[in-house]
Image (cartoon, helix red, strand yellow):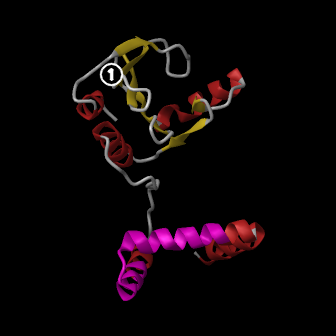
């Protein structure tokens, strides 16, 4: 997360800046924002430290589709969550629109660039996944057999797992404990 990536996403256009009022990111937190001026348009923001240039958070709001994406620097996630709890507020972007927290900068940049460009984008959330080599090879071979990409295969497997979990959470937890004990 860098100021450069934010500036590139917004085409080096800034419409406002202000001292960030929450304390979770420290006393030198400052926000820059680019809003395209359309209430059915978009805005993209960055919160950073004016002394160190550490980026704490980036946000991309798609008002047309009522979606709000955010990525918070992992070093400051706990402090941010604590301030939300201290303030006793709902963590909403606006009205009834909840933030969609992303974990990968590539995912955020892809969505933010598409929002700024006014084009459709993949609303699925990318997650980091570290699989052992043998499991990754097995998944790749199964994906090949099914004629789909590895990403689609893993997406389908995780989706199936979530369906199973919704149906019977205790059974899925028990199965996970068994697999963990086999390691």
Quarter of the figure with residue 39: top left
Q: Is residue 33 left or right of residue 102?
A: left
Q: Is residue 73 left or right of residue 112?
A: right
Circle 1 is placed at which residue position?
53
x and y, in percent, of residue 48 in the image: 39, 22
Residue found 37% across the figure and 78% down from its top: 148
Instruction: Give the magenta part as a residue range.
Output: 138-163
x and y, in percent, of residue 23 in the image: 56, 16
**Prevailing SS of the magenta stretch:** helix
Q: Is residue 140 magenta?
A: yes
Q: Is residue 164 visible?
A: yes
Q: Is residue 173 visible?
A: no
Residue found 41% across the figure and 84% down from its top: 142
Residue found 27% across the figure and 34% down from its top: 9
Q: Is residue 145 magenta?
A: yes
Quarter of the figure with residue 31: top left
x and y, in percent, of residue 118 in the image: 31, 41
Is residue 65 positioned above or below 171 on the image?
above
């Amino acid at each position: 997360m860098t100021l450069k990536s934010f500036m590139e996403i917004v085409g080096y256009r800034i419409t406002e800046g202000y001292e960030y009022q929450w304390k979770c990111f420290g006393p030198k937190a400052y926000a820059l924002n680019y809003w395209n001026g359309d209430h059915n348009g978009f805005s993209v923001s960055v919160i950073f430290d004016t002394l160190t240039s550490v980026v704490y958070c980036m946000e991309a709001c798609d008002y047309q589709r009522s979606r709000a994406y955010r990525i918070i620097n992992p070093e400051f996630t706990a402090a941010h969550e604590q301030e939300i709890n201290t303030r006793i507020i709902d963590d909403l972007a606006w009205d009834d629109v909840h933030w969609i927290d992303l974990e990968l900068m590539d995912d955020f940049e892809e969505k933010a660039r598409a929002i700024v460009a006014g084009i459709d984008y993949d609303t699925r959330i990318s997650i980091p996944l570290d699989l052992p080599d043998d499991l990754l090879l097995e998944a790749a071979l199964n994906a090949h057999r099914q004629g789909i990409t590895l990403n689609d295969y893993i997406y389908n497997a995780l989706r199936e797992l979530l369906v199973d979990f919704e149906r019977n959470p205790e059974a899925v937890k028990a199965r996970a404990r068994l697999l963990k004990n086999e390691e």
